Image (cartoon, rainbow, N blue to C red):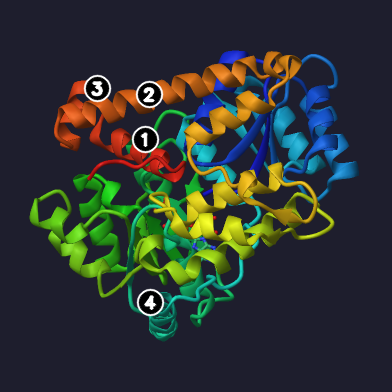
Amino acid sequence: MSEGKLLLVEDDASLREALLDTLMLAQYDCVDVESAEAGILALKNDSFDMVISDVQMEGIGGLGLLNYLQQHHPKVPMLLMTAYATIDNAVNAMKLGAVDYLAKPFSPEVLLNQVSRYLPEKSIEGSPVVADEKSLALLSLAQRVAVSDASVMIMGPSGSGKEVLARYIHQHSHRSAEPFVAINCAAIPENMLEATLFGYEKGAFTGAYQACPGKFEQAQGGTLLLDEISEMELGLQAKLLRVLQEREVERLGGRKTIKLNVRVLATSNRDLKALAEAGEFREDLYYRINVFPLTWPALNQRPADILPLARHLISRHAMAMNKTEVPELAECASRRLLTHRWPGNVRELDNVVQRALILSVGNAITIADIIIDSCDISLAAEVNSVEEEAKSNELDGLGNELKAQEHVIILETLSQCNGSRKEVAEKLGISARTLRYKMAKMRDSGIEIPA
Ligand SMILES: Nc1ncnc2c1ncn2[C@@H]1O[C@H](COP(=O)(O)OP(=O)(O)OP(=O)(O)O)[C@@H](O)[C@H]1O
């Protein structure tokens, strides 16, 4: 899920890289540049939802960039980063229009909290596109549940549309005019999740120079979506349960309790009941959030959704790519889409559609434009590549090569360990959580993972 596009401006290369990692891990689409001047160029070529910039840099610096932004993109919020000693500058910059500042050094959770506070809410998409009988029944059930205030647990495989359904429930509830706040429990590092959920007071931990409300407070009056709740560690689950039972929250390092009026929705692509039985998920929390369960079947279990979804995604992306016409899906291309198993579900279909739109010429998407797995991509790239292009893509290519190797290693280790995720994680020296995250990304790109 891409939550918004950010421009990051920082002249210190290692800090820039660390910030970029934090933002990308939290699934923000991010472009990074090393100077305010490069930032202006990026703003001329692309549109951004937010700018995060250092203040002290060679050239016009962060304040020069702020000035440019105020004149040309006054609606884009700008967050400044500054050394502690020069906070006065930042405070002045806020008077000039910056939305806030971060005093260096700051921890990743401080950055993510500030970003989520000021990033404009992503435009709400319409209702989920459904045509299959199973999906129609699910949607009508969701509509009835929406008007109650019950907690809803949305299950289904990765990329099946759980977040889309959560937004739909919010939009059809009496809370629809209030905020919808989503937090991905898998994407936020474990040690940052608590502060992000519950907020913190100034001085609660190193780098907490300012108090910051958590997601619960941000969702006050509205709906909070706890995406991939199965990835929350047991200690934090206990704290979450308390907040849900008491309907109040206390910020980290704070003494004041804040009354909450928030409806909680949760999603999981793992079998939470089985996890609860295995002691990996708190049973009491499971029953509290599972008041009303809804489950999306995998996309291949609801084949009548495939073509309407493909057409919807084609028109959505064609508009975003400023295509003058929305290409038609040729008969042969439709047949190809219907015969694939879609291990990455709708997200994989989304990727395939985007590739097809890039490749298509004229006003039709044909079978030649439908590239379904990574092998097809490398073949197509080979056929199409010209030497100069290859040169300029050298770095990208290296990234892809490494990723492909990682995929091979994961698949080989899975087969050596007879599919045991636990053993694979131990063998590769990564946490089970990271392994799951990597496998989900592989599935999204269409790689089939043995059960
Ligand atoms: N029924 C639908 N109608 C329109 N778009 C959909 C539908 N289902 C999924 N999508 C699109 O597919 C993509 C993946 O959907 P979503 O993020 O809701 O999946 P998810 O099940 O929450 O995934 P994950 O488990 O990885 O978090 C999004 O771009 C979403 O807009």
Relative vertical location of residue 30 with respect to residue 262 in this rendering, above or below: above
Q: Which of marks 4 and 2 precedes in the sequence?
A: 4
**Residue 178 shows which numbered tag?**
none
- Which structural element holds mark 3? helix
Q: Which of marks 4 and 1 precedes in the sequence?
A: 4
Do residues under tags 2 and 1 come within 8 Å of each other at their CB atoms? yes
Relative vertical location of residue 432 with respect to residue 311 in this rendering, above or below: above
User: Is residue 277 among what the camera can see?
Assistant: yes
Residue behind label 3 places its C-beta within 8 angstroms of ligand 1:
no
Callout 1 environment at 10 Å: few (<14), some (14 to 19), or many (20+)? some
Q: Which of marks 3 and 1 precedes in the sequence?
A: 3
The residue that disc 1 covers is 438
**In this rendering, the label closer to the viewer, 2 or 1:** 2
| Quadrant, the C terminus | top left
The residue that disc 2 covers is 406
Compute the Cα span from label 1 to label 3. 12 Å
The residue that disc 3 covers is 428
Compute the Cα span from label 3 to label 2. 10 Å
Q: For the residue marked with disc 2, what is the amino acid?
A: Glu
- Which structural element holds mark 2? helix
Q: Could you tell whether 346 is left or right of 417 in the image? A: right
